[in-house]
Image (tube, grey):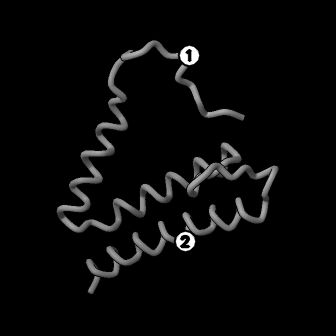
């Protein structure tokens, strides 16, 4: 499975608006020290990996080729997302 879709799109076919918005939100998360936003991003990556059967950590890791490594990375993304969200929620409660 290839994720290279550059050939199917015309060059300069438009700005990826959702990606641009995500970059702005992540910049705000860094500036205002909002860890839960990073948690939501990791949660999104986890869900996307589970549905697609491929995750990325330096290079693509496919579920059918390396199942143990795939599940280890997916669990890491999920664990990090829950930890980051819990850290901010605990800070609000305390």
Identify the residue shown where x is 53% and y is 52%: 45
Q: Quadrant of the N terminus?
A: top right
Residue 12: % across, % down = 36, 17
- Number of callouts: 2
In the image, is 62 to the left or to the right of 26?
right
Residue 14: % across, % down = 34, 19
In the picture of the structure, the residue carrying the numbered disc 2 is 79
Identify the residue shown where x is 68% and y is 67%: 72
Residue 24: % across, % down = 24, 45
In the image, is 16 to the left or to the right of 91?
right
Residue 33: % across, % down = 23, 68
Q: Could you give the CA–CA distance between mark 1 and mark 2, rounded to whole angstroms?
A: 35 Å
Identify the residue shown where x is 78% and y is 57%: 66
Q: How crowded is mark 2: few (under 14 residues within 10 Å), some or many (20 or more)?
A: some
SS for callout 1: helix
Indicate which disc, 1 or 2, sits on the residue closer to the N terminus. Answer: 1
Q: How crowded is mark 1: few (under 14 residues within 10 Å), some or many (20 or more)?
A: few
Residue farthest along the front direction in this orientation: 58
Identify the residue shown where x is 55% and y is 71%: 79
In the image, is 59 to the left or to the right of 93?
right
Closer to viewer: mark 1 or mark 2: 1
Q: Quadrant of the C terminus?
A: bottom left
**Up-down: is 59 above or below 2?**
below
**Up-down: is 74 above or below 92?**
above
Residue farthest along the right direction in this orientation: 64
SS for callout 2: helix
**Up-down: is 45 above or below 82?**
above
In the picture of the structure, the residue carrying the numbered disc 1 is 8
The reply to whether dot 1 and dot 2 touch (C-beta < 8 Å) is: no
Q: Give residue 16's mark.
A: none
């Amino acid at each position: 499975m290839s994720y290279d879709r550059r050939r199917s799109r015309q060059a300069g076919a438009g700005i990826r608006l959702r990606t641009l918005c995500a970059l702005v939100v992540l910049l705000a998360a860094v500036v205002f020290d909002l860890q839960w936003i990073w948690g939501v991003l990791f949660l999104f990556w986890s869900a996307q990996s589970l549905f697609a059967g491929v995750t990325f950590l330096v290079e693509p890791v496919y579920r059918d080729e390396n199942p143990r490594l795939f599940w280890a990375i997916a669990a890491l993304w999920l664990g990090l997302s829950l930890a980051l969200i819990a850290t901010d929620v605990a800070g609000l409660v305390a």
